[in-house]
Amino acid sequence: MPEKETLERARKDKREGKAASTQVGEFVREEIEHIREGQHGARSTKQAIAIGLSKARRAGVDLPTPQNASEETKEQAKRDTRRARSGKRVSATRSRATRKALKREPRKAASKEALSRHAKKAAAARKK
């Protein structure tokens, strides 16, 4: 469940007419902070961003499914969007299992170096 402040910041962005990606940025920022604080880890920066995107979709941000992603990713995005519309919550058992698995992951995914490396790779991929 996203923090109240994150939801508020995302709603404010929406009221101001900002793009969905700007609203999603709040959730990704929250996820990076959680990793830095040591609440849990992530295998890679890409995974940390994916967790933030998923949280945003489940919170109701109107983010379209990615066009150039794998079929699995597209399916997950559709599931997240459906979850937001249904209003159902994830079971406590599943949440606990996910949190426990993420706690075992390294914390380096949210380091300045890792984020910089990811940004450079993403920018290079866009240029092609």
Image: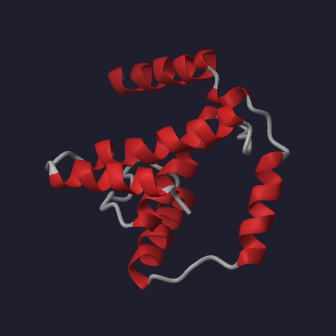
Residue 115 percent location from the top left of the image: 55, 23
Confirm whether residue 58 shows in the render.
Answer: yes
Q: Quadrant of residue 62?
A: bottom left
Color theme of the render: secondary structure
Q: Quadrant of residue 124?
A: top left
- Residue 21 location in percent, x, y? 32, 45
Residue at 52 percent of width and 83 percent of height: 88
The answer to whether 53 appears left or right of 38 in the picture is left
Q: Residue at x 46, y 66 (%)?
A: 58
Q: Is residue 47 left or right of residue 120?
A: right
- State whether residue 96 is above or below residue 63: below
- On the rendered structure, is 1 left or right of 40? left
The spot of residue 71 in percent (x, y) is 52, 60
Q: Residue at x 43, y 84 (%)?
A: 86
Q: Position of residue 22 (x, y in %)?
A: 30, 42
Count of residue discs: 0
Residue at (85% x, 45% y) in the render: 104
Q: Is residue 46 visible?
A: no
Does residue 114 sit above or below 4 in this rendering? Answer: above
Considering depth in this image, is 65 or 12 the residue closer to the camera?
Answer: 12
Between residue 71 and residue 110, name the one nearer to us.
110
Determine which quarter of the picture holds residue 87: bottom left
Q: Is residue 70 above or below residue 98?
A: above
Work out which residue is located at the far front of the displayed protein and give it: 5
Q: Quadrant of the C terminus?
A: top left
Query: With respect to residue 97, does 127 lie above or below?
Result: above
Q: Quadrant of the N terminus?
A: bottom right
